[in-house]
Amino acid sequence: MGSKKNKLKKAFSPPFQQSPPLPEPDDDAELLNDLMAQLDSGNQTVQAESAQVIQDIQRQETVSGTKKDPNSRYQARQARKAAALAESYSPSNPEADARLMQEAKEEESNIRRICDELNVQIYEINPDGHCLYSAIADQLALLSIIPPAQANYATARLAACNYMYSHPDDFIPFLPSTSGEDGPGALNAGIISPKGFEYYCQAIRDTSEWGGEPEILALSRAFNVPIHVIQSGQPPIVIHNPTGTPNDGDVRDKRVVRISYHRRMYGLGEHYNSLRPQSKLSNISNSLQNILS
């Protein structure tokens, strides 16, 4: 496993050698990210236990205070994010549960309708915190951009990390300040610092922290392929181009990465799946469903 990981890192290493290596991951930060990934588990027992541990960590940090070095600020930001997620697992009333269930059904119906129009089907990705990267890696292998043996989240995480780290000016202006998020005026804290950006890239490469818009753009540029994100809402298809021009492209182009974005699929939401071409069996099943409905 170690040698394979080293080979992947070498294959996708940044083009310049004079830059300092990214800092090694901190044990506490790794623990926190693992707990956050477990919140995305379909096992309610695992979710509840992880939420309790996260809440305990948050209480301890509140009592002991937070250090001022960048790594501690990053951990504090992650702790607050994790604590907010953990709170979503507190007991809720039946009306709220019913509303969320209805929203999840509507979202799934909207996404599947768009998939049918594009003749693709949802290929479910494990909800483990790596879903964005796993979904894109699956698509890259389908397009023969990467070998099937490298179609995993580690490959995609490393590529996103290296591209962002090699092109800081393209991403730093759009990332929030980690130090500002730890103090007053967090919503107007300015952009991330260069040191904070290093930790951000480190988290992409070495942890299970979720990915989003910056990472999708980085992967689109790293592999020079458009990435289309199908979602419930407007616009129904968000297009990310390597050139950086948003929503400019053919939605029926076959040489694109297609993934779906779900906010309610697993209750907590923020999940991505891969969209593979529909099989003959799925086409028959869809036709039968249309006749019966």
Image (tube, rainbow, N blue to C red):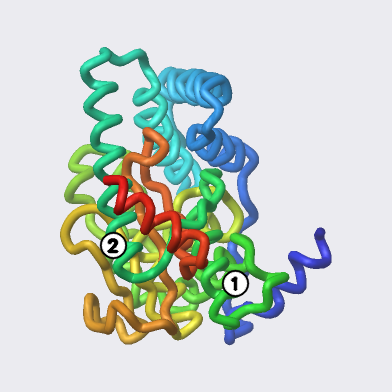
Q: How far across and how far down the image is residue 192, in percent? A: 33, 59
Q: In the rendered view, would you say 222 is above or below 55?
A: below
Q: How far across and how far down the image is residue 19, in percent? A: 57, 77
**Residue ID for mark 2:** 114
* Callout 1: SS: loop
Side of 190 where 112 appears, left or right: right
What quarter of the picture does the N terminus occupy? Answer: bottom right
Under mark 1, the amino acid is Pro
Which image quarter: residue 65? top left
**Residue ID for mark 1:** 20
Are the residues at dot 1 and dot 2 in contact (C-beta closer than 8 Å)? no
Q: How far across and how far down the image is residue 228, in percent? A: 35, 71
Under mark 2, the amino acid is Ile
Residue name at image x 62 percent, y 79 percent: 146
Of labels 1 and 2, earlier in sequence is 1
Residue name at image x 52 percent, y 70 percent: 139
Q: In the rendered view, would you say 286 is above or below 103?
A: below
What quarter of the picture does the C terminus occupy? Answer: top left
Q: Residues within 10 Å of mark 1 (few under 14, many from 20)?
A: few
